[in-house]
Amino acid sequence: MKYIVFLLFLAFSCAQALSLSPKEKNIIQSNTLQCVSTGAWAPFNLLEKGKPAGIGFEYWTLIRQRLHLKSNCHLVKNWNEVLDEIEHQKADMTIATQPTPKRLEYAVFSKPYVTYPIVIVTRNDVGFIDNLDLLKGKTVAVGEGYAVAYILKKYYPELKTVYVESIDKALELIDEGKVFATIEILPVVAYKLNKYEFYDLKISGSIPQHFPLSIMLGKAHESLLPLINKAIDSITKEERDRINKRWITVYYDQRISGKYFYMLLGLFIFVLLAASIWLFLLKREIREKKRIEKRLKELAHLDSLTSICNRYMLDVTLDKEIALSKRYGTSLSIVFFDIDGFKKINDSYGHNVGDSVLSELSRLVSNAVRESDILGRWGGDEFLLILPETQEENAKKLANDLNRLIEKHIFKKHLSIHCTFGVTSYHEGDSRQKMMSRVDKYFYEAKKQKREAQESL
């Protein structure tokens, strides 16, 4: 049944072939890609009944069929062999990775086609890890050559890490008590736990960084990059949901050991005591799991610093609101803004003060808008406000009100800040990309006018 659904999914995908210009078709015709991957990074790339499968392969199938690209794929033993083949031009591409400085020397990367949280895995007897300071002095196993290893080295150089050949090896070392934890992408961990491979392990926390997955191309095929990005933009939410549903299920082991039952079998009073303890532990475990599930849901939707919507959730919400506007003819506006000279705040007062300003600004704006309005952090010091059923004139008035409110507010260290705003509304035929492009244009025009006014003083 699974394969029938998959075949129907592929048939639907084929119907979504992109409209291409003669020049674009010529580029595609002149490029035949030799793909290389491993079967050892489930659920992104794996072997299922002797055939390549997984999230990465399904996204690549969508992209390839949209463009009618000619491509063959072969598998190698490990990730380092994948990188070696692309670097030495034995292969042209791989399907699921992200850029690092070393890889950018010999390859180019598409825009991310999907982004996932990065989580911490430990044994079941470890509490929830909401602060990486709790890992100080602990040994963390990380896959050698994996992009997660690069992220940890860049952002957390003080972590005590050991490098292993695969995530399976890292999980084995935790299970054996030889290391404290591993850090890996959520779908990889969820897949392993859901397949009952490691009964005594659990997801105990996360790190603020996320993991975007891209297509990696050797530089000889750089001309294909805009077309691959075009195909990625065409992938629908329904297609993404089908892939996630097929491959990602976060599993929590609910078995409770029965070894004490056999020791106390002959004594009725101890059985009652064991039952009472069992119920107590079960209730505590359920509460803990609910807390973890809530935290994982927040990881997927909220910015870890400000607790407002993250970039992924903003994209999903704006797509949804555009679809509602198209269907019912309702108005929709967006407001894009950032903090003027935010870098100076970080440079003068430190990143802790900068983070405090971002958090306080988020609370200030959240309290000033309607419950139905959606505020999110676009990235850095940039924010996006989505205003359903709001005409552009009212959105501009709100932006002016927010501007005055922010300028009057005194932030940490007695700081006064100023923001620059861009505003636009939904036009017939708009996509998310068109709306964001237009509001970005108005935003930078406002920046330019503000800078010219300051220079004339």
Image (cartoon, rainbow, N blue to C red):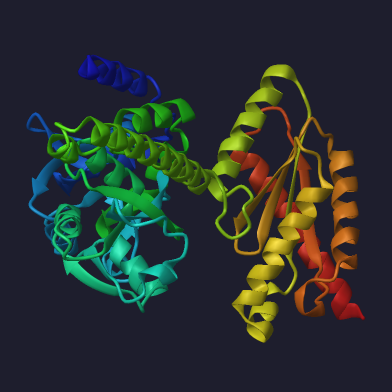
Q: Is residue 113 above or below residue 405?
A: above
Give whichever of 45, 223 is nearer the camera.
45
Q: Where in the figure is residue 19, as x and y percent of width and height?
A: 44, 29
In this rendering, position of residue 315 left or right of residue 263: right
Give whichever of 107, 1 is nearer the camera.
1
Q: Residue at x 36, y 66 (%)?
A: 151
Tell me, yes or no, if residue 254 can be seen here.
Answer: no
Looking at this view, name the residue that lies furthest to the bottom.
348
In this rendering, position of residue 200 left or right of residue 59: left
Give whichever of 433, 264 is nearer the camera.
264
In this rendering, position of residue 39 left or right of residue 209: left
Q: What is the tally of numbered marks visible in this picture?
A: 0
Residue 99 found in image quarter: bottom left
Tell me, yes or no, if residue 128 can be seen here.
Answer: yes
Q: Residue at x 36, y 41 (%)?
A: 281
Query: Which quadrant would the N terminus be assigned to in this image?
Result: top left
Q: Is residue 191 above or below residue 336?
A: above
Q: Where in the figure is residue 293, as x and y percent of width and height?
A: 45, 41
Q: Where in the figure is residue 375, as x and y percent of width and height?
A: 70, 47
Q: Residue at x 24, y 32 (%)?
A: 271
Q: Is residue 330 above or below residue 402?
A: above
Q: Where in the figure is residue 118, as x and y percent of width and height?
A: 38, 54
